[in-house]
């Protein structure tokens, strides 16, 4: 594939044309309507084709050209992208032939709550049940995993940040909103071209560098590292798709990222990875991950969101590469399962790894399974985890004033008509929606924790109210205060 490069003036004119056409996620949704938009989410373009077929607005033209991958009459493209067909054809973004223009890359609107952006990536394969297979250097668009990492990243102001394995540059766009400087790396030259274009189109400064893992940033430190690495574990023989497989053995890419993080982080810096890891057939996945993490001296919070059995895992990734149902599918399936068995792999785990460089004598390493509900971004939970670890390691939690998280709600349940509830539980309603059954003392502690009195003072007052021995209440509830802080119900 040829390089996708274009000059700054063309990029500026392209951005101006996209802006003038209102090529935004909101406007595309409004034009297509819910049904056609949902169909596009399933890779079906016919409903959107029907909506835009007769329309001649620049927005409809751009949707047909890029989103639906339809050939569009040259005159229509000239009106939507004035004077740009020639330069974008030279740049490898469009192909013009016989009075029609086709897109050679996807240019899609994307955004967060506050921004409208455009992202450049390869064309989505498999539209309208077409072939799914892609080349080894395919640059993925915004996937479920991209969005998951974007929701995980802590959005606090940061000096230098790193998007490792940038692909189309989507994480770098988010990072640029709260960073002094962003470095984005990839091994795929095509991805680097696309990441540069994505950044330039959105007027965002990103230092884009080629190389594997931490090599392009050797000796540099970052306040935040975000990566959605190619973490698919597959047999070594056969074609590798760079967006999902590195060529490293097993889950080594994740191990290397974890082991290298401490040397790249500033004091207090965070490394946040979306990752997959092997569950050994006869061994503990937690111990494997702990063995990667503990020598780094970093605080760690690992959340396994899902454990996937090997049959489901194989089906998922053979379908992803377009092999499902094709020739040799059953043989490939059998080969994957045989290789997993030979490697002693029992199943695969998938989730989040958060590492924080805090330089403490005894780092805090928490490795847990949480498959429960999650609402909205979880960056605030990660920030609360880091601050909670600091607070808990700074001294007796009873001597500290805590604040109950503002999104916590109390749920009382019991028989209809009963005077008192049989159970009280507290649930977080944002991020990780943890729920915990509490007793009267814990409920009282949570309702009185507003950052004013220490947990010890509140427990003393509750002991007095309930006619209990204050020292005994302190001793009994000290572990609960620690647990409530560790789980994010209490904030320092
Ligand atoms: C799953 S994609 C993630 C893309 C994008 N960051 C996102 O969140 O959607 C993984 C990216 O890592 C890149 N990659 C593959 N091997 C790599 C390596 N050894 N070092 C750095 N990046 C690598 C791939 O080219 C691909 O762009």
Image: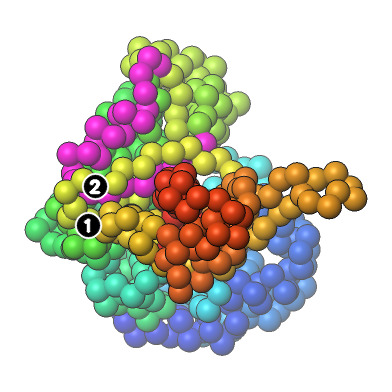
Residue 414, numbered label: none
* Residue 319 spot, x, y in % from top left: 55, 33
Give the x, y percent position of residue 365: 31, 43
- The crowding category of the residue bearing disc 2, from other C-alpha atoms within 10 Å (few below 14, some 14 to 19, many at least 20), is many
- 122 displayed left or right of 266: right
- The local secondary structure at tag 1 comes to loop
Which residue is depicted at the point 33% across and 60% down?
391
Q: Quadrant of residue 28?
A: bottom right
Magenta highlight on residue 284: yes
Instruction: List x then y, in percent, for residue 129.
Output: 66, 42
Mark before the other along the chain sequence, 2 or 1: 1
Label annotation for residue 363:
2
Residues in magenta, as a range: 281-306
**Residue 254 part of the magenta-drawn span:** no
Task: Residue at 34% x, 85% y: name it.
Answer: 9
The answer to whether the residue labelled 2 contacts the one labelled 1, judged by CB atoms less than 8 Å apart, is: yes
Identify the mark at residue 358; answer none if there is no mark. 1
Q: Nearer the viewer, residue 3 or 476?
A: 476
Quadrant of residue 402 within the rendered picture: bottom left
Horizontal and vertical percent position of residue 451: 46, 72
- Identify the residue at image location x=46%, y=46%: 472
């Amino acid at each position: 594939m040829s390089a996708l490069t274009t000059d700054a003036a063309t990029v500026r004119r392209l951005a101006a044309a996209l802006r003038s056409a209102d090529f935004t996620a909101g406007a595309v949704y409004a034009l297509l309507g819910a049904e056609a938009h949902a169909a596009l989410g399933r890779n079906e373009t016919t409903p959107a084709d029907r909506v835009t077929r007769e329309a001649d607005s620049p927005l409809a033209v751009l949707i047909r050209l890029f989103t639906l991958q339809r050939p569009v009459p040259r005159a229509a493209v000239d009106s939507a992208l004035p004077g740009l067909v020639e330069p974008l054809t030279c740049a490898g973004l469009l192909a013009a032939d016989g009075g029609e223009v086709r897109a050679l890359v996807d240019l899609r609107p994307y955004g967060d709550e506050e921004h409208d952006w455009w992202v450049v990536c390869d064309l989505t394969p498999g539209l309208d049940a077409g072939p799914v297979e892609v080349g080894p250097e395919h640059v993925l668009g915004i996937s479920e995993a991209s969005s998951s990492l974007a929701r995980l990243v802590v959005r606090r102001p940061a000096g230098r940040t790193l998007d490792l394995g940038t692909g189309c540059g989507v994480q770098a766009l988010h990072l640029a909103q709260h960073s002094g400087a962003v470095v984005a790396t990839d091994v795929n030259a095509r991805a680097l071209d696309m990441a540069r274009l994505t950044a330039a189109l959105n007027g965002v400064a990103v230092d884009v560098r080629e190389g594997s893992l931490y090599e392009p940033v050797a000796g540099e430190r970052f306040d935040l590292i975000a990566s959605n690495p190619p973490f698919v574990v597959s047999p070594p023989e056969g074609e590798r798709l760079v967006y999902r497989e590195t060529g490293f053995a097993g889950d080594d890419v994740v191990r290397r990222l974890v082991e290298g993080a401490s040397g790249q982080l500033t004091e207090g810096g965070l490394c946040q990875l979306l990752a997959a890891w092997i569950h050994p057939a006869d061994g503990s996945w937690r111990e494997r991950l702990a063995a990667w993490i503990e020598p780094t001296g970093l605080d760690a919070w690992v959340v396994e969101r899902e454990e996937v059995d090997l049959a489901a895992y194989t089906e998922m990734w053979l379908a992803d590469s377009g092999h499902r149902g094709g020739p040799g599918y059953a043989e490939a399936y059998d080969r994957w399962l045989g290789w997993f068995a030979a490697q002693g792999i029992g199943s695969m785990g998938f989730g989040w790894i958060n590492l924080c460089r805090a330089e403490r004598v005894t780092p805090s390493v928490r490795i847990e399974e949480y498959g429960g509900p999650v609402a909205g971004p979880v960056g605030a939970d990660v920030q609360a985890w880091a601050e909670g670890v600091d607070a808990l390691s700074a001294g007796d939690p009873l001597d500290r004033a805590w604040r109950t998280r503002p999104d916590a709600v109390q749920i009382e349940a019991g028989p209809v008509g009963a005077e008192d509830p049989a159970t009280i539980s507290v649930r977080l309603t944002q991020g990780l929606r943890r729920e915990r059954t509490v007793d009267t003392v814990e409920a009282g502690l949570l309702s009185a924790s507003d950052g004013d009195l220490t947990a010890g003072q509140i427990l003393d007052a509750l002991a007095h109210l309930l006619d209990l021995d204050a020292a005994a209440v302190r001793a009994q509830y000290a572990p609960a205060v620690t647990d409530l802080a560790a789980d994010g119900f209490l904030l320092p």
